[in-house]
Amino acid sequence: MNSFFKAIFDLLFPPRCLSCQNLLISGEEQGFCPDCQTRISFLFPPFCQICGSPLPAGVQSSNICHRCTVSAPPFEICRSVGRYDSVLMEAIHALKYQRKIPAGVVLGKILSAHVANLLPFGDYDRIIPVPLHKKRLRKRGFNQSLILARAMARDFSLPLDFQSLKRRVHTDPQIGLGRKQRETNVREAFECVRRDQIANSRILLIDDVYTTGSTVRECSRVLLEGGAKSVAVATVARA
Ligand SMILES: [Zn+2]
Ligand SMILES: [Zn+2]
């Protein structure tokens, strides 16, 4: 949008903070007011070297968490912006349940800015969002992970691929389920449908929230089985 039309648009639909809904003063392009920005619970090292879960203070970042030691994930590395609470949770809810697409664009930019230092973006060939089943897609109207992935693909000039990985099994929302149940739910839920496209590629997989890791583990497993060379994961929030 050119600046003239943007000014008119902002006058008609003044931008509001994605979390507290207060009007944003012009120039606050990040989507959150300064107050809410300070309330984002960013994750700080030390992290598990593989899955990125926060480790107790004082532990070396070269360490690996208990879960990854017991069962190594198929992905190489996973990193997230912050905890799934307050500001990030409100913005993700605004995107998923109130269909506020701009919230997704802002979250995608925050994800780009944050993980740019943690992941070697030059190493990836394509960005793939965790897919929704077509039933859920019809109900919601869009895939929130695709909106995040699109913003990142633009920021890093990487090809966006939302066709190679499909969700073939519809699962009920996983809220309130434990890890074992989630693992059972997502087993065989995904399918790699364009093996020729992903053969030998180094994939960056995007999801909105990392809860137990079951979903991104299963997606990664399917992509590797489909011929991908490696999978790295980035999510906005971590429960
Ligand atoms: Zn705010
Ligand atoms: Zn770990």
Image (cartoon, rainbow, N blue to C red):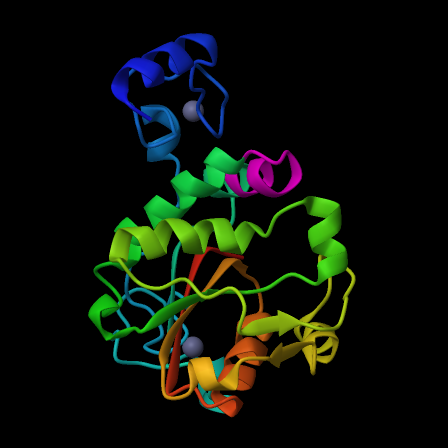
State which image quarter holds ligand 2.
Answer: bottom left
Specify whether residue 56 is painted magenta.
Answer: no
Residue that appears at 59% across and 80% down: 193
Type of secondary structure dominating the magenta stretch: helix
Give the x, y percent position of residue 212: 58, 69
Q: Quadrant of the N terminus?
A: top left
Magenta stretch in the rendered image: 91-100
Quick one: 96 or 131, which is closer to the camera? 131
User: Which percent across, then down, holds residue 216?
Assistant: 53, 72
Q: Is 214 placed left or right of 21 in the picture?
A: right
Task: Let me know if residue 97 is in the magenta part.
Answer: yes
Quadrant location of residue 168? bottom right
Residue 236 in sight from this viewpoint: yes
Q: Which residue is pictured at 34% across the width and 16% down the height?
A: 5
Q: What percent of the width, then of the height, locates residue 160?
A: 41, 62
Q: Residue at x 39, y 35 (%)?
A: 39
Q: Position of residue 3 (x, y in %)?
A: 26, 19
Q: Quadrant of residue 107?
A: top left
Vertical comparison of 23 with 29: above or below = above
Tell me: 64 left or right of 96.
Answer: left
Q: From the viewer's perspective, is residue 128 above or below residue 221? A: above
Q: Nearer the viewer, residue 32 or 84?
A: 32
